[in-house]
Image (cartoon, rainbow, N blue to C red):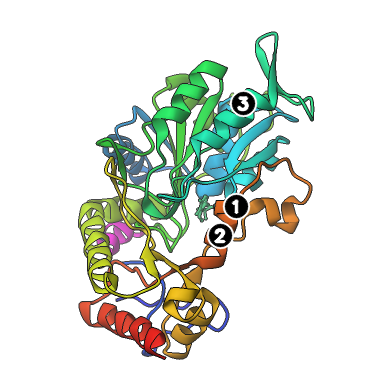
Amino acid sequence: MNTDPTNTTFEPGAPSAGGGIPLCVPEIRGNEWRYIKECLDTNWVSSVGEYVTRFERQVADYVGARHAVAATNGTAALHIALLVAGVQPDDEVLLPALTFIAPANAVRYVGAWPVFVDVEPEYWQMDARAVADFLKNECRRQGDALVNRRTGRRVSAILPVHILGHPVDMDPLLELAREYHLAVIEDATESLGARYHGRRVGALGDVACFSFNGNKIITTGGGGMLVTDREGWARRAKYLTTQAKDDPVEYIHHEVGYNYRLTNIQAAMGVAQMENLDAYIAAKREIAARYTAAFADLPGIHPMREAPWAFSIHWLYTVRVDADAFGMDRRALHKHLAEASIQSRPLWQPLHLSPAFADQEHRPCPVAERLNREALSLPSSVGLTPAEAERVIAAVRAAHTR
Ligand SMILES: Cc1ncc(COP(=O)(O)O)c(C=O)c1O
């Protein structure tokens, strides 16, 4: 297993490569060296090249979307997705409270405002009932627009986040989006390969984003991708990610663009990683099955469940720790595992409680708050060996006995 200590999943105080079990590190076992060497040998190292085009095609085909546009990272892809979806400054965008902060930041990049809603307790994803409640009871129609009664701002999009490798229950959200004329931007950064009723995430909404950060199921070191069926949106996304160049000879620009390009070297790595994606997903699912079987009789450990309509990639295997039944809360378990050189990680601070988003519009989010108190992600690297998984299981069991 590659245990690169510079990987962003390592936190201060996390176990280092020597003997520790990291949370989630890259797996490099395919054609990465060969393809990257080819870039170096041919001098195609920068922000255009055959591998960029190939990587875009590969991801679009895999997901089942017509178009893909590579980007510097998932956050940049989200920024551009919001722009092509027509989200305007001072609009509001609905987001789950329980997610990594990047999609909320991207909403602010376009000058819009997030409205946080709760997640549902079964699979921990954005709760369509909370979205419906907000749209029906807190908003009013004003001409073609939907307006938040309290703030007077236009509500223009829903941004579901498929967290931890599991899809959001999308049908009710898509129905609400149709009813209220809202764009749907999928944040699929944690869930490449996950399926909802057999369809891959990323091809469910109007536009979707993936991340190839070092901790994701596949990595390009850093990288992202936007996918969409809409040709005009894809063309505009390419335009905006490449400095909005209207005349590449005379350097004429009609608007402000961004340098959000992925390099050919990174794309070469992405192409190699994509070749192994299905094997990586199978490995993650095997790890999840092993943990779940081992914890079945352990009081107070409740693994995140997979919905009957879902195919989860189990990006980060996560359990809820019921302190009374287990005999230790998730903070103590986190510490106990760290003492055994096993890295684990709590879920994100719910965004309605984040100082970065203080005073933001939000609905009550008791489920997100509870999951933040109780949930802990366990080592989930593709290359986690059965012996390492058994070490994690034994350490969790030992914590219960103690
Ligand atoms: C839910 C979510 N959205 C967006 C991102 C941003 O992706 P990136 O780190 O590639 O910018 C991440 C992960 O990093 C994420 O977990």
Residue 25 at x, y percent in the picture: 38, 70
- Quadrant assignment for the N terminus: bottom left
Going by the image, does 367 lie left or right of 171?
A: right
Q: Identify the residue position indicated by label 2 in the image.
A: 370
Inspect this view and state whether residue 206 appears. no
Q: Nearer the viewer, residue 79 or 173?
A: 173
Query: Is residue 37 located in the magenta-colored stretch of the structure?
Result: yes
Q: Are marks 1 and 2 in contact (CB under 8 Å)?
A: yes
**Distance of mark 1 from mark 2, alpha carbons?**
6 Å
Numbered badge on residue 366? 1
**Distance of mark 3 from mark 1, alpha carbons?**
19 Å
Residue 372 at x, y percent in the picture: 56, 62
**Distance of mark 3 from mark 2, alpha carbons?**
24 Å
Q: Are marks 3 and 1 in contact (CB under 8 Å)?
A: no
Query: Residue, x 68% and y 36% (percent of image)?
Result: 110
Q: Nearer the viewer, residue 307 or 227?
A: 307
Three-letter residue code for mark 3: Leu
Three-letter residue code for mark 2: Arg
Q: Quick check: is the Cβ at mark 2 less than 8 Å away from ligand 1?
A: no
Q: Identify the residue position indicated by label 3 in the image.
A: 135
The mark nearer the N terminus, 3 or 2, is: 3
Q: Nearer the viewer, mark 3 or mark 1?
A: 1
Residue 323 at x, y percent in the picture: 49, 74
Q: What are the residue bounds of the magenta stretch? A: 32-44
Tell me which corner region of the image, top left, top right, bottom left or bottom right, holds residue 139: top right
- Provide the secondary structure element on which disc 3 rests: helix
- Quadrant assignment for the C terminus: bottom left
